[in-house]
Amino acid sequence: MSIQSLYATARRSLLANQAATNATGQNIANANTPGYTRRQVQLRSIPPTRGGVFFHGIPNAGGGAGVESFNRVRSQILDVAVRKGQAGSGGAGESAALLATLESQLAPDGGDGFLEAVSSFFDAWGDVADAPTDLGVRDALLSAADRLAHTLQGADERLRAFGRSVETDLSATVDHTNQLLREVADLNGSIRTSNSQGALDPDALDRRDAIIDELSALGPFTARYEDNGTVTLTIDGMVAVQDLEARPLRVTLPPETDVASVYADGGSRPLRFGGSNDGAIGAQVYLLGSTLPDALASLNALAAEIVNGVNGVHIGGTGLDGGTNRDFFDPAGTLAATISVSSSLTSDGIAAGTGAPGDASLATSIFGLGNATHESATRLLSGIGAKVRASTAEAQANAAYTDHAMALRDGVSKVSLDEEMANLIQYQQAYAASARVLETAESLFDTLLTL
């Protein structure tokens, strides 16, 4: 083994352990930095070299240690699991919040006032049946009818206002998503350049992974890592980021389309979202395209049931004024937004019966419609409530799955101070030992000079 080889071995060992110590120090410094992935230096044995002053008969053990690679400790399998969980957690959480708001807009007091307005209206018909000629009771019926109409109109107005608010939120969510896609494309450029130069840009990689995590909570994005260091992002089979190009998503809203839709850049069909498992965008699109229209349809069906049911009976009766063939509700207003009492109807025009003195057969019949109508109103409210409970339970389950997946990933990628401190001591001792080898080589060289 030559003196030159001994010098080189000691020098390489110093540099290798210095690099490992620096990486460990970086890990310790960033133990609490969000999104930081721990770094790891892989050392390798250097093969023996010849040259310089050589001691014959003494075997050459090798050329010391060098840096094989500088890596981020990351598992793509666990990344996929975490992002799947985040898509479900973000979507279910957003869906639960949206449905809870929808429920509160439909019935701000938990449904008591809504159901009470329905019950009070039909109970008022029962009072008319008990006292068919009492004008005061008839006035109370008209007041109860107005209150019921205003209750349905108010619910319709609040639901539609809520829908417009969600449309605004959807546009903002997609705008934010497009900003993140653009940033991923920019980071692709930086990372690709570093890779082409044989270097690693761990900070850019950490930032890109953190953005992809965030994007997963917004929509069902799929990441594919390319050989040149870039990442390709797709959603519903459509490319959102490729190399240095970001392809923004586009929102279309009524009246441009029947329902709010999201399109990929250049796509001719709207992206398909399954609801609560497709991130916040999926939850918002699903609510606007399915849940909210269903709620409005059920509300309109309830209004139509009331208008058609009451009018169907009332039109065959005679009022105290002798008038016949009159509707109680305006027949043109069969929607929740348009339901109203006929403008020409007065207290003595209400048909409680067929005209015989004291006849209240029609009022009794209309009163009898109350049970079925009350059940329809209850189904409307309970249906939304059931969706809220199911979505909340799904959000909790997805959150638990995501937390578990993140804990597994953190066990691989996150800094453990205990482990890093042990590594630091190991590398420091190796560095000190390498320095001692270098001192020994110098001593040997000085001895040779004196011979």
Image: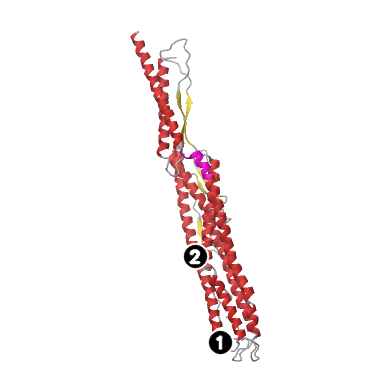
Q: Which residue is mark 1?
A: 347
Whole-percent x, y for residue 341 in the image: 55, 81
Residue depicted at x 45% and y 51%: 179
Of the pair 310 and 335, the residue shown nearer to us: 310
Picture layout, residue 344 above or below residue 111: below
- Is residue 333 visible to us here? no
| Residue stretch in magenta | 405-415
- Pointer 2 local density, CA inside 10 Å: few below 14, some 14–19, many at least 20: some
First reached walking from the N terminus: tag 2 or tag 1: 2
Residue depicted at x 60% and y 81%: 125
Q: Which residue is mark 2?
A: 164
Relative placement, left or right, of 350 versus 54 is right
Picture layout, residue 233 above or below residue 65: below
Whole-percent x, y for residue 263 in the image: 53, 56
Relative placement, left or right, of 5 versus 307 is left
Picture layout, residue 203 above or below residue 379: above
- The nearer-to-camera label among 2 and 1 is 1
What amino acid is found at the position of numbered circle 1 in the picture? Answer: Ser
The circle on residue 428 is none
Q: How many marks?
A: 2
